[in-house]
Amino acid sequence: MLGFGDTKPKAPAAGLVTDGTEATFMQDVIETSREVPVIVDFWAPWCGPCKTLGPALEAAVNAAGGKVRMVKIDVDQNQMIAGQLRIQSIPTVYAFWQGQPVDGFQGALPASEVKKFVERVAAVAGDGGLSEAIAAAEQMLAEGAAADAAETFAAILEEEPGNAAAFGGLARAYLAVGQLDQAEAFLGTATPELARSKEVEAARAQLALARQAANAGPEAELRAAVKADPANHQARFDLANALHAAGDVEGAVDALLELFRRDRDWNDGAAKAQLFTIFDALKPQDPIVLKGRRKLSSMIFS
């Protein structure tokens, strides 16, 4: 049984915001910017606008989760570097990438503009190959290599803790090997923002379906019960669960659509709710989803 014991994502990297000096500028800014964009905030203790801009910058950099770093330079204590970069007023902010300044501004900005600036700077480096890593992990999962996929998803989360695709992928890796409790516990650690993402919602839907599958009844007996009494809505609902557990997703959707057609209000609209759970667990463009949603809509508005 796979434990995935070493795949727990680590906390966001420390030191995203540091104080710099002339002695450390080359290492903290120029060299570091060859790996990740670095924002440099030139400030002074007596500067009123700096007291507003600095915390806003720090918050936005920390929220970026490691995609960008920040170095604070006190111009009173580091006049040489301020002169070399021709800092004429403060606050002045420069962004460095690959050892060169690529963006910047002077004066204080609203928090919303500061956030956009940090996002723009973070984007200059692309995603560092994370998209390719996610695609590779998804391929591993599709091929049954759940442990390898879990390790890759966890490594991505170390680089970018807020990556919804990797978070949902790691939860699905647990589900792939039947570790439902571990998947549920992991999903419980999602931040509010992650919890609202479509990737995490899909993993939650798959978890719910997996729980139901564990309690699904015998398909043959349920088919016989429905045939004997087409008005037996509970049997039809249970048959849909059994079909889904057996991998017949389209059959499950058809059974639920028929139940909805017969009695859309049965059990507080259970058929419709179950259909949405199945749709959420699949990719939005899956043919089963498109066909099922179209049929459901026609029934709702008929």
Image (cartoon, helix red, strand yellow):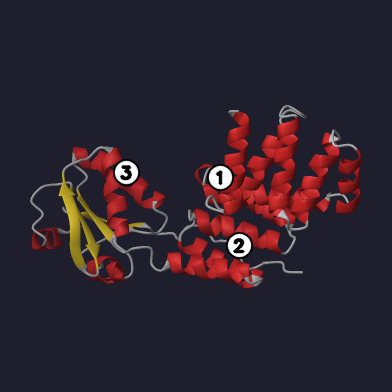
Task: Provide the secondary structure element on which disc 2 rests.
Answer: loop
Which of marks 1 and 2 precedes in the sequence?
2
Which residue is disc 3 drawn over? 55
Q: Quadrant of the C terminus?
A: top right
Query: 139 or 227, which lies in front?
Result: 227
Q: Quadrant of residue 50?
A: top left
Image x and y of residue 128, in percent = 38, 67
Is residue 52 visible in the rendered image? The answer is yes
**Mark 1 is on which residue type?**
Ala
- What is the spatial separation of the Cα atoms under label 2 and label 1, in whole angstroms? 17 Å
Which amino acid is tagged 2?
Answer: Lys
Q: In the rendered structure, find residue 195 and report the number of the disc placed on it.
A: 1
Q: Identify the image quadrant of the N terminus.
A: bottom right
How much space separates mark 3 and mark 2, taking CA atoms?
30 Å
Q: Nearer the viewer, mark 3 or mark 1?
A: 1
Secondary element type, mark 3: helix
Q: Position of residue 56 (x, y in %)?
A: 31, 43
Residue 246 picture location, percent across and down: 78, 57
| Left or right placement of residue 175 versus residue 139 in this view | right
Inspect the image, locate mark 3, and give the three-letter code of the amino acid beneath it: Pro
180 left or right, relative to 191: right
Q: CA distance from mark 3 to mark 1?
A: 27 Å
Q: Residue at x 13, y 58 (%)?
A: 82
Q: Residues within 10 Å of mark 3 (few under 14, many from 20)?
A: few
Say which of marks 2 and 1 sits in front: 1
In front of the other: 144 or 225: 225
Q: Which residue is mark 2?
A: 8
Rendering quarter of residue 270: top right
Residue at left 73%, top 58%? 247
- Decide which of 31, 200 is in the foreground and name it: 200
Give the residue drawn at x 27%, y 56%. 121
